[in-house]
Amino acid sequence: MKSIAIYGKGGIGKSTTTCSLAIALAENYKVIQIGCDPKSDSTKNLMNGKKIPSVLDMIRKKGNDVVLEDIVYKSESGIYCVESGGPTPGIGCAGLGIIQAFKKLEELKAFEIYKPDIVLYDVLGDVVCGGFAMPIRDGYADNIFIVTSGEMMALYAADNIKRAVDNFVGRGYARCGGLILNSRNVPDEDMVVKKAAGEMGLDVLAKIRRSDYVQKAEDEGKTAIEMFPNSDIADDYRNLARKIIEKIEEMEKNKIEKKDKKIARRI
Ligand code: ADP
Ligand code: MG
C-alpha cells in the first residue's frame, strides 16, 4: 500500500488536483481518498457534487455505533471516499478532528477491509500544527507532495510544509517527493516555482495548467479528467499520476539502498 499526502495552502487546488489524480490512479489501482480539511469538500467532485457525511459528524450523531458504511462512500468511478470533518467553527481544534477520524478508521479496520493499493490524504497546510501534521508525523503518509502556484503565499505555505516534513524525516518515514505546480498564470510562474523549489531542496514534479474545463466539470459535480478525458488538462493529471508513482518507487529504492549500505557497514 502506498500512502500519499497532498498538502498545500487553502484554495490552491489540492482537492481539485487530488480528485483528478485519484481518477487517473484508479485506472490501475484501488484508491481511497481521505479529505483532511474541516471544509469536508475534498471528495465532492467524485460524488456528483454532493458532500458525504464526515467522520466527525457521524461520531457526533452515533457515538460508538458508527460503522464503516457510515463514513466510507464508494464513488461511481470506484474510489472509496472519506472526509475527516471538523469541529463547530470557532469551537475546538480542527487538527483534533483529523486525529479522531484516523483513530476511528483504524478501529473499524478500514484499510484491512478495503485493502487499497493507494491512500490519498488531501490535507490543508496553512498551519502544520498537531492534527494537520498527523498524516506525516504518525506514519500514516510516507510520501508527501505539495501543491503550489507561483503566488507568494502559496510558496510560503509550501516552505512551511517542507520544514514540517523535515522535522519528522529522521524517524524514517514521510519523504517529500516534490512540488506540484497548479498554475495560476502569474508572470514567470515556471521560473519562480522552480527557483523556490530549488531553495527548498525539491523538484517541480509536474505542472497542471490552468483550465476552464476544471470549473465546467465542477459545475456538474465532476472532475475535469472524467468530463474531458481527451483534453490537455486530463493529460496533465495522467502525467502527474505517472510522475508520482515513479517518484515513490525511486524514493523506496533509495531507502532500501541506504538501509543495505548501513547493514553492509555494520558487517
Ligand atoms: P483546496 O482544496 O486547495 O482548498 P480547491 O481544489 O477547492 O482548493 O480549488 C479551489 C478552486 O480553484 C476550485 O474552485 C477550482 O475550480 C479552482 N482550480 C483548481 N485547480 C485549477 C486549475 N488547474 N484550473 C482552473 N481552476 C482550478
Ligand atoms: Mg480542499
Image: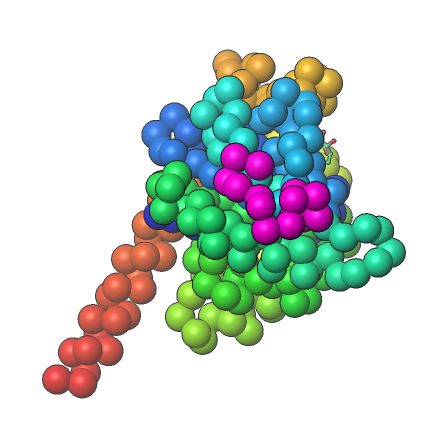
What percent of the width, then of the height, locates residue 114? 39, 39
Residue at the (49%, 34%) spot, across then down = 80
Magenta-colored segment: predominant secondary structure: helix
Q: Which residue lies furthest to the bottom in this view?
A: 266
Which residue is at the front of the view, 225 or 195? 225
Residue at the (18%, 85%) spot, across then down = 266
Q: How many labels does the image show?
A: 0
Q: Does the magenta stretch include residue 91?
A: no
Q: Taking the image as four quarters, which one is ligand 1 found in?
A: top right
Q: Which residue lies furthest to the left in this view?
A: 267
What percent of the width, then of the height, locates residue 230? 50, 14
Residue at the (69%, 16%) spot, across then down = 220
**Above or below for 256 versus 211:** below
Q: In which quarter of the image is residue 170?
A: bottom left
| Residue 92 in sight in this render | yes
What percent of the width, then of the height, locates residue 93? 75, 61
Which residue is at the front of the view, 133 or 175? 133
Residue at the (42%, 65%) spot, across then down = 173
Q: Residue furthest right?
A: 90
* Magenta range: 56-70
Q: Is residue 64 magenta?
A: yes
* Position of residue 23 in the picture relative to residue 247 (left or right): right
| Residue 245 in sight in this render | no
Which quarter of the rendering shows the C terminus? Answer: bottom left
